[in-house]
Each structure stands twice: as structure tokens, then as C-alpha cells.
Amino acid sequence: MDTVTEHRMAIAMALQGGIGIIHYNNTIEEQAGEIMRVKRFKNGFITDPKCLPPNAKLADVDRIKAMYGFSGVPITETGMLGGKLVGIVTNRDTDFIVNRNTPVSEVMTPFAKLVVAYEEDHKNLEALNKIMIASKKAKLPIINKKGDLVALMSRKDLLKHRDFPNASKNANKQLLVGATIGTRPNDKERVKKLVEAGVDLVVIDSSQGDSMYQLEMIKWLKTHYPNLDVVGGNIVTRRQAAHLIAAGVDGLRVGMGVGSICTTQEVCAVGRPQATAVYNVASFANKYGIPIWADGGVANTGHIVKALALGASMVMMGSMLAGTEEAPGSYEFIDGVRVKKYRGMGSIEAMTKGSSTRYFADKKKIRVAQGVSGTVMDKGSIQHYVPYLVLGVRHGLQDLGQKSLKIMTSARVNNELRFEERTHAAQKEGGVHDLHSYKKQLFG
């Protein structure tokens, strides 16, 4: 969703062990740029550092810092990766220089004073990490025997690895990130750019996933990018799951019309209760080793526990994360309450910006909304909010007597984990009631 996940949210979620899915309510270049920002944030080898030539100005360093968020810039003879390393410019070299037209060659730390590592002698990250720790430097250039710059390492990456040991990352220690795509012909070009940017998986975004357009897109993706994980959906029945699994999906997104800002069931009269949909689709898909994403209807940690108990491998959260600091947009105050804007991709507001392809309405003169726009309360930073969610889920599994998700899955399959229907009265007494007033604080 364009009011939930861009690079800041994706970075924050990956550091906490989750994954962010970048929306496609933007241009191909913008979406690919969001992916690249995530990939650059926490990397073992920075294989494409921004370089400058010796005659570049400090203003060029400022531009790189503003655009990409880092200030350590290697200086090579050619101004590109692969050129002979002659020095490096960091904040320490530039902070107190007023004239931003000063050539970087006058302020850079020259090659003779740099600590470098040779790629021929150090083949793994552990050895390079030891060199960086011993040098007490912020950047470690990696060069070949000719002196050409091959890659760069950052001290900040070591600190992030220490502070976020459970971060979701690939073999190169890059954060994991996904992206949504549509089923139109130009989405094939979008996929190409996303793969070049380093995306780890794509989610085919459709309100009704069992369509010939999505089946064709899945087959095309698995033919041209066989190593790219593809998540299909949205679906709610076993028959829909069977079609997408046969086409080659690696995961299924389950949920139709159950999100807090979704009106698909009201407008189109299609959908299914989320618990029923997750249980039935998971029961079928698990036979083929296909994981289920529970998408929609998650409003608290109790819902997460239920989704996992019913067979979901993960949950997608929109409204729960939309009010955090990392979500796109700015805060505003309504009736003294600090809130952020949150909208469904089926709302007229979102479709006007570009999401109408998701609802097959991009060429329609009249667009029928399948979502609304609204606001959600401020929830603070992901760094504090997600650990609260994780702890809540752990408490839920503890009270269920399940030591792990794997054990809970076995209990469900063996009919040891049972569910009961609850009346409206039971649901009411299960929440806060019979108080004149109360204050609800999620964590502290």
C-alpha cells in the first residue's frame, strides 16, 4: 500500500526480521529506486558505491548524500567503480568547509593514509570485518592488486548487524525486500528493472487473483526468472489455489474484502470470512509445500496468533503499521489526536494515482471504489512496535501450550488444536467492558 510501505518501512521491517513489500502506485523507476535504497542500507559488500573523480566538487558529495543517504564517497581516477582508487571523502573531511565548490582532491583522505583490503587475499566477510574493526575506520575500500576499486564496506553495517541480529537478509547480508506488480504487459518491463535493482520476491497484486491474466504472468515470470519467488493472489478458495499452484507460484496471498479499508464484499458481493479462507486454502496448499500469507483483517496480536494457528505462514499488516513513523506521509492532528493518512488501494484517491489496474479500472470512465481513505492513530516507531507484536504472539503461543510454530502446525494437522465458535456475547465479554472509562496502552 502506498500509505504503508516504501523504503523506510521496508528497511525497518527487514531489520526486525520481517519483510516489506514496496507498492507499485508509482513509476517503474521510482519503485526500482525504492528497492535499491533498501538494498544499499545494510550490505556486506557495497558492490556499486557512488564514486567521484578528483576534480569533483564538495557540492557533488552533498548531492550524493541527499539522494542516497550516505556520505563516504570513494575518489577514483575515472570517477567510477573499477577506476584506480586515489582517496576517499567522508563527513570528517567536509563538515567545516564553507565553500562547497572546493575540489574533493583538496580535502580527501589520500590513498597513502587509507586502510584497504585486497580482494585476492580476503574472500569472506568475516575476515574483512576483522580488518575494519582493527583499523577503527568508518569505511574499508576493497581493491585488486592493480589498485582498482572493487567494492566498499561500511562500519555502520557492522553496528546494524550487532543491534539487529534477527534481520532478514540474503547471503550478501543485504536486507530482503519485495515488490508488487500488476498483470499488464508493461509490468514485464517493471519486473526487469526490479530484478536489476535486487528485489527478492514479487507479489502479483490483484483483488481477484484467479484470472487468466495472473496465470499467464506467473508462467511468464517462472520462465524468464526461475529463481525469483512469486506470490500470487488474492484468493479465498481451494480451487483458486489449485490454479495458481499449477501455474507455478511460490506463495499464496489469502484475503478478499476483509481489510479495514476494503469494501470489496460490500460493493462486489464477493469474498469470504478470513479465518475460513485461511484454514481451507492452507489445508490444501500445505500438501504442495506452498506457504500462505494471511492478508487482511489483522487488527491486533490475537488476530496474528489465530492466523498462524489456522495455517498461515505469515501475515500482512496494513492498518497496524500505517500509523508508525516509518510509514509514508506526515502526521496531522484531528480532535487533538495525532494521526496519519491511510487508504485502501481500491479507494478513488489511490486509483486516481495509479492503482486502478489492480481493479481492472484503468480504462474505465467511471471507477467503482472498492476501498476507502481514512486515518489511523500514531503508533510510534517500528523499532518499538514490532517487538511488542512479537512478544504478544509469543504470549499467545505460550498460553496455547505450543513451544513453536512448527509444533503448533503439527497440533493442527493432528486435530489436537481445536477452535470454538463464539457468540456475540462471548466476544463482548472477551474484551474490556463494564468500565466508566479506561486508558489503553499497548506497551511500555
Image: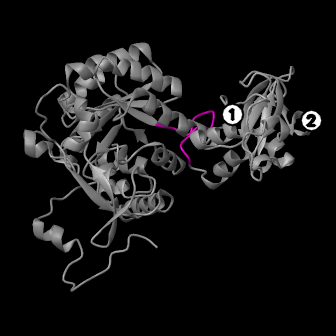
Residue that badge 2 annotates? 112
Q: Write down the region rendered in magenta.
A: 167-177
Name the amino acid type tagged 1.
Phe
Mark 2 nearby-residue class (10 Å; few <14, some 14–19, many ≥20):
few
Q: Say left or right for 289 vs 126.
A: left
Q: Position of residue 170 (x, y in %)?
A: 57, 35
The residue closer to the viewer here, 269 or 104, is 104
Say which of marks 2 and 1 sits in front: 2
For the residues marked 2 and 1, what is the alpha-carbon distance in whole angstroms? Answer: 22 Å
Q: Residue at x 19, y 42 (%)?
A: 348
| In the rendered image, the vertical position of residue 392 relative to residue 434, given as above or below | above
The reply to whether residue 328 is visible in this rendering is: yes
In the rendered structure, are the residues bearing label 2 and label 1 in contact, judged by CB atoms less than 8 Å apart? no
Mark 1 nearby-residue class (10 Å; few <14, some 14–19, many ≥20):
many
Residue that badge 1 annotates? 45
Q: Earlier in the sequence, mark 2 or mark 1?
A: 1
**Hey, which residue is sitting farthest right in the picture?**
112
| In the rendered image, the vertical position of residue 388 relative to residue 343, given as above or below | below
Q: Quadrant of residue 90?
A: top right
Q: Secondary structure at mark 1?
A: loop
Q: Residue at x 41, y 23 (%)?
A: 191
Q: Say left or right for 329 vs 117.
A: left
Name the amino acid type tagged 2.
Ala
The residue closer to the viewer here, 410 or 363, is 363
For the N terminus, the image quarter is top left
**Hey, which residue is sitting farthest bottom in the picture?**
436
What secondary structure predominates along the stretch shown in magenta? loop
Q: Position of residue 339 (x, y in %)?
A: 33, 63
Q: Quadrant of residue 251?
A: top left
- The mark total stands at 2
Q: Secondary structure at mark 2?
A: helix
Answer whether residue 169 is magenta in the image.
yes
